[in-house]
Image (spheres, rainbow, N blue to C red):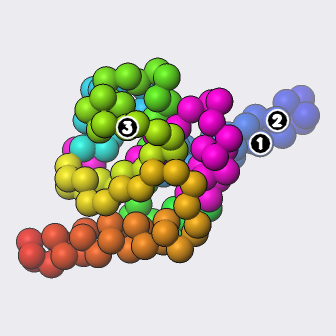
Amino acid sequence: MLCNIRSAVKLTTRNISLLGRSNKKFEITDNTEFVSKVMNSNIPVIVNFHAEWCDPCKILTPKLEKLIGPMENLNLAIIDVERNPELVHTFEVKAVPAVIAVSNGLVIDKFIGLVDANMIESLINKLTESTANTYNKNS
């Protein structure tokens, strides 16, 4: 009995922590989800177009997660190019990894390929500055 209670408590604790993280990083599965979670988001989103077979993608995604993870007002959307051909066409993704920064439904900046942490930080700064400027204009 005690063992079952401990398991339930551990499971509940894990679910709570996972819920918090799921809002930060999420996988986009279709156009409708992209519109609701990225284009209509109040929080800026970095969108990572990747493929399972792409070795540079396997390096870039953890870099993005590490840099974005501690930031409260920035989310990471992952899009598998094999499963989302319409989004690939819409954003004219010709190579992976491809990353776009979206704020208030607008693409602020983008890059293609495996880049260093400074380039990612620059993209994040543009995105957060853009959001701050929009917020200040509306205040």
In the image, what residue occupies the spot 60% across and 44% down? 57
68 shown above or below 37:
below
The reply to whether residue 43 is in sight is no
As for residue 97 lying within the magenta part, the answer is: no
Can you identify the residue that label 1 sits on?
10
Give the Cα separation between the discs numbered 1 and 3: 42 Å
108 shown above or below 135:
above
Give the Cα separation between the discs numbered 2 and 3: 45 Å
Q: Earlier in the sequence, mark 2 or mark 3?
A: 2
Give the Cα separation between the discs numbered 2 and 1: 5 Å
Q: Position of residue 36 (x, y in %)?
A: 27, 36
- Label 2: state its secondary structure: helix
Q: Which residues are magenta?
A: 40-65
Q: Are marks 2 and 3 in contact (CB under 8 Å)?
A: no
In the image, what residue occupies the spot 89% across and 29% down? 1
Can you identify the residue that label 2 sits on?
7
Q: Are marks 2 and 1 in contact (CB under 8 Å)?
A: yes
In the visual, does 119 lie left or right of 138? right
Q: Residue furthest left?
A: 138
Q: Amino acid at mark 1?
A: Lys
- Label 1: state its secondary structure: helix
Q: Nearer the viewer, residue 2 or 90?
A: 90
Q: Residue 14 appears in which quarter of the rendering? A: top right
- Label 3: state its secondary structure: loop
Q: Position of residue 49 (x, y in %)?
A: 46, 40
Q: Amino acid at mark 2?
A: Ser
Q: Is disc 2 surrounded by few (<14), some (14 to 19) or many (20+) residues within 10 Å?
A: few
Q: Position of residue 99 (x, y in %)?
A: 43, 50
Can you identify the residue that label 3 sits on?
93
